[in-house]
Image (cartoon, helix red, strand yellow):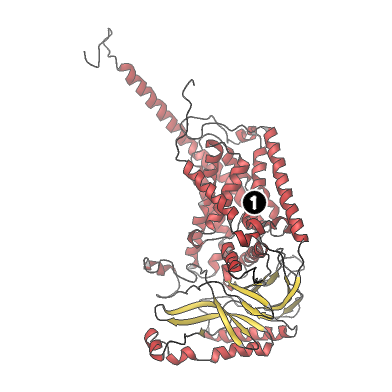
Amino acid sequence: MTASTLVTDGTTADMPRRDDRSVEEIIARARAGQRASEAPRCRKLAMGLTGVTGTLLFLSFTPVDFSPAAWVALVPLLLLVRAYGPLRGVATGVYVVSALYQLVTLQWMRLGDPTMYVAWLALAFYLAAYWPLFVGLSRVAVHRWSIPLVVAAPVIWTGLEYLRAHLLTGFAWYLIGHSQYRWLELIQISDITGAYGVTFVVLLANAAIASLIPTSWLARCGLTGPARSGDGETSAIAYQPAAGWTTAVACIACVAGVLTYGVIRRHQAEFQPGPRVALIQGNFVASLRRPPEEYATVFTTHRKLTGMAVREQPDLIVWPETMFPWPLFSTPPDLTLADLKRIAPQVPPDLWRDPEVTKALATESQMAGAAMMIGLEAIAPGEKTGIRHHNSAAFIRPDVGLVGRYDKSHLVPFGEYLPFAKTLPWLQAFTPYPPGWGLTAGEGATVFEYGGWRMAPVICFEDTVPHLVRGVMAAGTNHERGDEIDVLVNLTNDGWFHGSSELDQHLITAAFRAVECRVPVVRAVNTGISAVIDGDGAIREPEVFLDGATGNATSWRDPRTGRWKKQLNAAVIQTVPLDSRRSLYVRWGDWFAASCLVLTVLLACSRFLPRHRTPAGG
């Protein structure tokens, strides 16, 4: 007998098996068609909900600065996480709208130079990928592993924020927690968890609200459907009202605990008067093609403002990043003239040891009768490195002259150096700089001392990088010897961004460094916003505000709108409030956010683990 045994009606015994396969193929085609028809609907639904989230987040940050919106902004996106059954096309819809949000939020990047349009687009499209990644990982946690939404969402979002603060040199702007900078009691938790802890609390509230929405409402929005096996998301999660309210109560208790901690920590503050600082702020739009005659104008303006500030008898005067127009040549004493000719044949050898710039800096400090920290370019030769260009902060004392300098260590890609310059030289075409251009990163933190105070400079966007500032504090602190950094000094040139919301957001981000490290931050910023921030993260009103243009303004705040003024020549004089509190964040680092990232990575890996399936009828 063959495998195809004949039966009485002339058919073979394997015909039912072929019929079974035909039925399975029909069912499979039907399911494929149904899924194909579902994709456009799901994509539109995802775009609509993500659009609401994007709009609310935009309102949360500057220029609108309506921080309460952040407490509900993620709810629409979390509804996509709660939805059960397969959602075809959701990732695409979320990504498209997220990219639009990033483009609008980061539009200030294009103002620096026409070539910055490429960097603006690239960064926006890169950051947009985090939203669909968040939705996908959260759905794995909720539907595959039955992890409560109020646990999964805050952990995953915080972990992803920590990831983007480090990946590809990092971008720690517009963290959800930054939207709450005015709620000082809430942000005090940053001295344990960093700003990421504030993000976690806000996400917790969003997830609790999303959990309270009845399943029937989700059904009306098309966010529920029959669960189907084989999709990896096979069971509807039962959101019981009692469980939802229990979650809400737990969330309220958590927020209350964080606020209680904040109230206690603020009451522990005993600010002592520190150095009296004068923050000099010019108003010069930055450009790669600055006319030569403007260099003299920049110098003259800063000298004039310094002269106005000297009447207030400051201990320290700070000029912003790169506002001293002449480079500081620095040469190791062991290099001979012959060495210098060989290393840099295009530079006259005598120029390397020309004392004129050093003398000019010393003269400025002596005339002011105060120490000065001035942003400038430093140029140094090296046997192995060739000519090195640094973005630096020079420190000058009236009694001894130039003491030393700090070289910026965290450079901005495409703005200060070309990544992969040797392996991908064609990237040069996307920058306005000539071949061979690029700054050299410094070797680490530097601490300057004057009048019994220890001051550490950070330059430009370095004050937006939590782990870098924490590293500066850790490197300059020795509790056994009693060596602690008293003041962080930020020298910045925000003139690239033409008075946009970047100036506000940069100041807001810096405020979190003050809380994390429990140290005052003083900022001298070209075009604004210069300010003194105390250890609570409060942006202090200046004791003396000198308007270098009209002489009419007496405060940074516009009396009609309450917003910070920008793009004006001015000087801010303030006695720095020293903070004696210690920070666990400085000691322990990003343990909290790093733990969230580890859990997120484990969750992502779990997506590929086989899941147990209950046999039919079992």
Q: Determine if residue 351 is in view.
A: yes
Q: In this view, does 512 lie above or below 456?
A: above
Secondary structure of residue under mark 1: helix
> Which residue occupies the foreground of this view, 433 or 362?
362
In the image, residue 47 above or below residue 111: above
Front in this rendered view, residue 513 or 332: 332
Q: Picture coordinates of residue 457 (x, y %)?
A: 60, 74
* Left or right of 460 on screen, residue 26: left
> In this image, 302 relative to 426: left or right?
right
Q: Which amino acid does label 1 sit on?
A: Leu
Residue 493 position in % (x across, y down):
59, 74
Query: In the rendered view of the protein, which quadrant contains the N terminus?
Result: top left
Q: Name the residue under label 1.
A: 56
Judge from the rendering whether residue 562 lies leftward or rightward of residue 402; answer left or right.
Answer: right
Tell me the quarter of the picture where residue 438 sits: bottom left
Determine the image quadrant of residue 235. top right
As drawn, 556 above or below 68: below
Q: In the image, residue 490 lies at what x, y percent?
A: 62, 72
**Front one among 191 and 33:** 191
As drawn, which residue projects farthest toward the front? 480
Q: Position of residue 43 (x, y in %)?
A: 51, 42
Residue at the (35%, 23%) spot, across then down: 21
**Number of numbered tags placed on the structure image:** 1
